[in-house]
Amino acid sequence: MPSPTPRGALWLSFAVLMVAVFLVLQHPLQDIFTSGSHSQTFCYSKGVTAKVSTKTAASCFTVKDGLIGDVFTPNSTTPPVQARQGHALPGLWDGHGHLLQYGEFLHSVDLFGSSSVTEAKDRLAAYISKHKGVGTKDDWIRGIGWDQMALGVMPTAAMLEDDERFKDLYIMLDRVDVHCTWVSQPVLDLLPEDLPDIPGGEIIRDPGMGVFCDNAMEAVMKLWPSPDDARRVVFIRSAMASLHQSGIVGVHDAGVTPDQLRLYRELVGTDDWTLRVYAMIECEERNTFCPEKVSAFTDSQGFLSVKSVKLFADGALGSWGSAMIEPYSDRPETSGSLLVNASTLTSLAKSWSSQGYQVNIHAIGDLANRLAIDAFEEALIDLCPGQMLSTCQAGRRFRIEHAQIIHPRDQARMHSMGIIPSIQPTHATSDMKYAELRLGNKRTAEEGYRMHSLLGLKLILGSDFPVEPPNPFEGIYAAVARRSPHTGKGADGSLDSWYPEEALSLQEALAGFTEGPAHGAFLDGKAGVIQSGALADWIVLDEPLESLDIEDLRTLKVKETWVGGKRVYARD
């Protein structure tokens, strides 16, 4: 073939250039280079926080095949690279959330902050007006966020049935903590007329029927026409996009059924899956042993890992469901309730851990936390006979999810064994309005909402979304300021911090959203850091966190979020 003429060569070069320009316009250079085998260098004008706990800093890092390569600060011998605007931080993880529930919440009735039954019903009516045809027996109206403390009364089915806007509609609205649900009369009509009390749960009968709590919720949940796979994929997409907007690159998904795991495994590796998920197995029948329905699994790119299980010891404080050693101060006739007895909890911890699974137990009240620690102790003795419990625990990394109210004696046991607390700082600032009513001053001061007291146990921090907003900077603010990220105020409406002796430093709180979740998911050195060999997950802020006033965290917006070397969110 004859060589091109000079003019032909010119046109050929021009065509190649135009194709390259087109590709750059369609896909930023970083997306092109990091999606293949090429290495790309990222430098940031405000620097890079490479590791939070050691305050390791740099200016640049390279990315290849979804992993971090070199981390460095340029010098006179380094080839020049144009710096991008902003400050890079390791990607943030939420140590306890609910992916599918959050996605469903984004497509349901938002009742958070409702201050009266009238306001809650008006929000419900607004949702119905935008979603014609919902509320049938095959398509219930779902919502979340009501709190009887804010409403001023426990809601009932009659409150919905007596309103013409909701008459004959199938409605199921979860309490703010998802430990109770409020249903309409058509849902009640599906149940037997004489409902017995249910162990580990409560059917609220006064001022009227309509609310089911903890284990009693199962009577309603088994009637609910759950979403099909197509709908759940929509929920997952929405949830992941929203989480990326907050700077979240990974989530510890606290309670995933075998059927949900099936869907997760089908989606991993597709464009629908952009978030790293550390899934905790929850059997279809809660607090049971179902190893034949699940298997440990980690995909090759680190986007889904299944090696832990979620058990439940008790309910929530707001609905008087958390199991306490002594009665509630504002309801002395009750001490809450256990969702499972002590011997069964211990047996389950032993059974799951003997199969190689990390065991994570939901425990809020001090009795529930004590029994969780007892169960872990017995399991560790069985797993590592003759070995120090702390040494055995270092390899097993058993966790208490929430760890909200812990007797001082049991706090010492946690330190002795190295049991990991998975804490949600915004639970403290949400509950502070009524925690002392429930617990009394002495119990709150000695046991409630520990953070600083549990340092040294590699705290995992999170939000429990959708119970709380997933914004990690709100969680960091709550941990550091011990005030509400929504108002900037303390429990009494002043600027006083709530039990400030339990506050964390900015560095400690940030580690709780980076290195803490990494350790809790057996990802030390792979997640929550920007270092050679780590997953190429990071976020970009306009300024370094340490240069901001603490109040700025309440309104901070992430500039960019990157997962596996690919940009999954850009603010501008």
Image: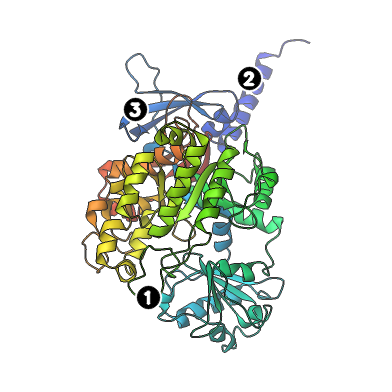
Q: In the image, what residue occupies the spot 33% across and 59% down? A: 485
Contact? badges 3 and 1 (CB < 8 Å): no
Q: Amino acid at mark 2?
A: Leu
Q: Which residue in the rendered view is the most extreme toward the right?
A: 1
Disc 2 to disc 1, C-alpha distance: 86 Å
Question: How many discs mark residues in the rendered view?
Answer: 3
- Mark before the other along the chain sequence, 3 or 1: 3
Residue 245: % across, % down: 47, 50
Q: In the image, what residue occupies the spot 65% across and 53% down? A: 233
Q: What is the crowding at mark 2: few (fewer than 14 residues within 10 Å), some, or many (at least 20)? A: few
Specify whether residue 2 is in view: yes
Classify mark 2: helix, strand or loop: helix
Instruction: Name the front one of labels 2 and 3.
Output: 3
For the residue pair 545 and 160, the one nearer the viewer reads as: 160
For the residue pair 195 and 178, the one nearer the viewer reads as: 195
Q: In the image, 11: left or right of 391?
A: right
Residue 475: % across, % down: 37, 52
Q: Which residue is mark 1?
A: 331
Q: Which residue is mark 2?
A: 10
Disc 3 to disc 1, C-alpha distance: 55 Å
For the residue pair 32 and 293, the one nearer the viewer reads as: 293
Classify mark 3: helix, strand or loop: strand
Disc 2 to disc 3, C-alpha distance: 43 Å
Instruction: Name the front one of labels 3 and 1.
Output: 1
Q: Which residue in the rendered view is the most extreme toward the top?
A: 2
Can you tell which mark lies on residue 58? Answer: 3
Q: In the image, what residue occupies the spot 26% across and 42% down? A: 547
